Amino acid sequence: MVLWSFIAATFFGLITPGPGVLTTAGIGANYGFKAGLRFVLGLFVGNNAVFFIVAAGLFATLEAIPYLRMILAIASLLFLLYLALKIALAGSKIAFINPTKPPGFWGGLMLQFINPKAYAVNAFFLSNFPIMPDAPITEIAVKCLISNIFWVPIHFLWLGMGVWLQKLELAPKWQRLINITMAVAMLFVVGLAAFVAKTG
């Protein structure tokens, strides 16, 4: 019963829009499948790294140091703002952040390290649903496997949605509106995830 509860929580926790999937859709919509695939690969590696950082208790230690927590928060905000602007300005004549060059593997990797939702969701998965309380290492491995089973198709679904939008060849004004909407939504869910993490 606990296992099925964990599977359900994993599905709903990952399907909920966050910075990763929204950025993936935005890259797919503006730069195509190959660029999106490189970004998703970076997200995948980064998400698993964050999973084990949380499992090892390193993030809790970092969060306990006030000045490091502030540095992380500022870095998170700046990088997420940068990604949001790249999506919002893609196809625009305003090019002060080079919107024609998509964030690739390293962009996806870095995003997960400063993505508040990644830490909050993984911490929730690991601190709840005791599947194998007598074998914590095995439990961590099983939870990581189940998480990835959902994580991969969900991110490819969002990438596919973005590529589909690209193929529609919408008028420039509608494309810009979609870009701006995705960028604003990304920043909104970042703020929400950060708020939940601080008050939860």
Image (cartoon, grey):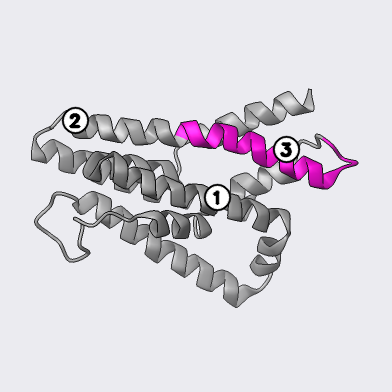
Q: Residue at x 22, y 44 (%)?
A: 30
- Quadrant of the image occupied by residue 33: top left
What residue is shown with label 2?
167
What range of the chain is rendered magenta? 132-154
Label 3: how many residues lie within 10 Å, few (<14), some (14-19) or many (20+)? some
Which badge, 3 or 1, comes first in the chain's sequence?
Answer: 1
Apparent side of residue 63 relative to residue 81 in the rendered image (left or right): right
Tally the numbered discs. Answer: 3
Q: Which mark is residue 47?
A: 1
Residue for point 26% across, 50% down = 87
Amino acid of disc 1: Asn
Q: Which residue is mark 3?
A: 142
Identify which residue is drawn at 62% across, 33% down. Answer: 10
Cα distance in 3D space between marks 2 and 3: 38 Å
Circles 2 and 1, Cβ within 8 Å, touching? The answer is no
From mark 2 to mark 1, how far is it between C-alphas? 29 Å
Residue 183 is inside the magenta segment: no
Q: Which one is earlier in the sequence, the residue at label 2 or at label 1?
A: 1
Camera-side residue of 196 and 7:
7
Give whichever of 38, 125 is nearer the camera.
Answer: 38
SS assignment at label 2: helix
Residue 54 in the image: state x and y as whole percent. Answer: 67, 55
Q: Are discs 2 and 3 less than 8 Å apart at CB?
A: no
State left or right for residue 181 relative to residue 2.
left
**Could you give the CA–CA distance between mark 3 and mark 1, rounded to whole angstroms?**
15 Å
Q: Is residue 16 left or right of residue 105?
A: right
Is 5 located above or below residue 174 in the figure? above
Q: Which residue reaches farthest bottom?
A: 67
